[in-house]
Amino acid sequence: MARHIRRIAICTGGGDAPGLNAVIRSVVISAAKRGWECYGIREGYNGILFHERYPDGGVFRLTPEKVRGIGHLGGTMLGTTNKGNPLQFPMKMSDGTIKEVDRTGEILDFFAKQELDALVSVGGDGSLTIANALHQKGLRVIGVPKTIDNDLDKTFTTFGFDTAVDFASACLDRLHSTAESHQRVMVVEVMGRYAGWIALHAGISGGAHAILIPEIPYDLDKVVAKILRRDSLGRMYSIVVVAEGAEPAGGHRAIVAPAEIGHAERLGGIGERIARVLQERSDKDTRVVVLGHLLRGGSPTSFDRVAAMRFGTAAVRGLAEGLSGVMVALAFPNVNYVALEDVAGRMKGVPMDCDTLQTARDMGICFGD
Ligand code: F6P
């Protein structure tokens, strides 16, 4: 029989997203209401795997007092990392080669030694895959879905997405006037590695004329035709939003650094690539704006704050009810719990039959197809 919960830990992993601090705060406060102690793990699992690096402890006590006033702040008070997955941790061998080693046993030992009864793991696909593995090895774990990309399956949305879309859309609003004044084409590159949710939502909300997403391989001649059609109607400027992971039909994604042991590939440069071709083929002055990590910063919107707190408190309620191996999800109008194994390793791209995509098409937005 599982022990009655007295002490839980929380960690944040992967790229940061606005709302992480609101989750931490809500977990700590709702756990304290049940008389549970809460501990924060620094930088994903690094606080456990490299505790000697942290002079004041890789894992430290979180009290309601310690999380006071952080709910509206961006980033994560615990720190995070998207390197060094403990399931495939890059380690230097005695012969100098680098090998991937499973270090989850060390995490389980740490939990047992510190008498930590359960873990709330806040993260995206990578973190939830690790959480699932820890659950299968016997740890009580509940996952909380985070990512600005909104590409996690089995939840209507992740926290962080609304803030990213809101900011991107505000940037597009500003670009209209300068683009129109100079009769230019503006290419706006947004994050979205393998899913075009940010580009799609920000593009619709911010009045983009073309949106290029990873799910729809593009043909730039179609975009040029759209730009020139607008010109012929006297609308002498155009805004093109492109997700960093968009790729041309029959071509490749723009990769800055390929995947290597312990690190996923890094994307970037698609905006520049597209702008060059659009300028050449349309003969219009073209500029590029890369929003990149600006989308991950700043205060969460009220939607993301509420979502984060609903997720955090639901994680604690779930643990109290004896759940493990699940992720808290948003299934309007309520939160529910879905099996981590149904989420881990599954990406949610923009479905071709979703009404948001249809909305954009009906509004005359070009997808380059
Ligand atoms: O948070 C997810 C994400 O925003 C991706 O869209 C992007 O490719 C990635 O993070 C970049 O992460 P970093 O530069 O921190 O490695």
Image: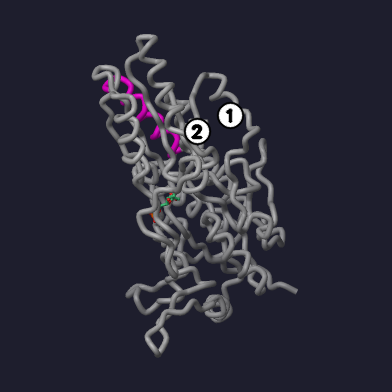
The residue stretch that appears in magenta: 163-178
Q: Is residue 343 visible?
A: yes
Asked where in the image residue 228 lies, by quadrant, the reply is: top left
In the rendered structure, the answer to whether residue 151 lies left or right of residue 331 reads left
Residue at the bottom extreme, as displayed: 94
- Circle 2: residue type: Leu
Which residue is denoted by mark 1 in the rendering? Answer: 356
Question: Looking at the picture, which amino acid does disc 1 mark?
Answer: Thr
- Residue found 42% across the figure and 53% down from its top: 16
Q: Is residue 304 visible?
A: no
Q: Are marks 2 and 1 in contact (CB under 8 Å)?
A: yes
Q: Is residue 317 magenta?
A: no
For label 2, the SS is helix
Q: Which mark is first along the chain, 1 or 2?
A: 2
Bin the neighbour count of mark 1 within 10 Å (Cα to Cα): few under 14, some 14-19, many 20 and up. some
The residue lying toward the viewer, choosing from 138 and 215, is 215
Say if 221 sits above or below 54 in the image: above
Task: Provide the secondary structure element on which disc 1 rests.
Answer: helix
x%, y% of residue 214? Answer: 50, 42
The residue under label 2 is 200
Classify 10 Å Cα crowding around label 2: few (below 14), some (14-19), many (20 and above). many
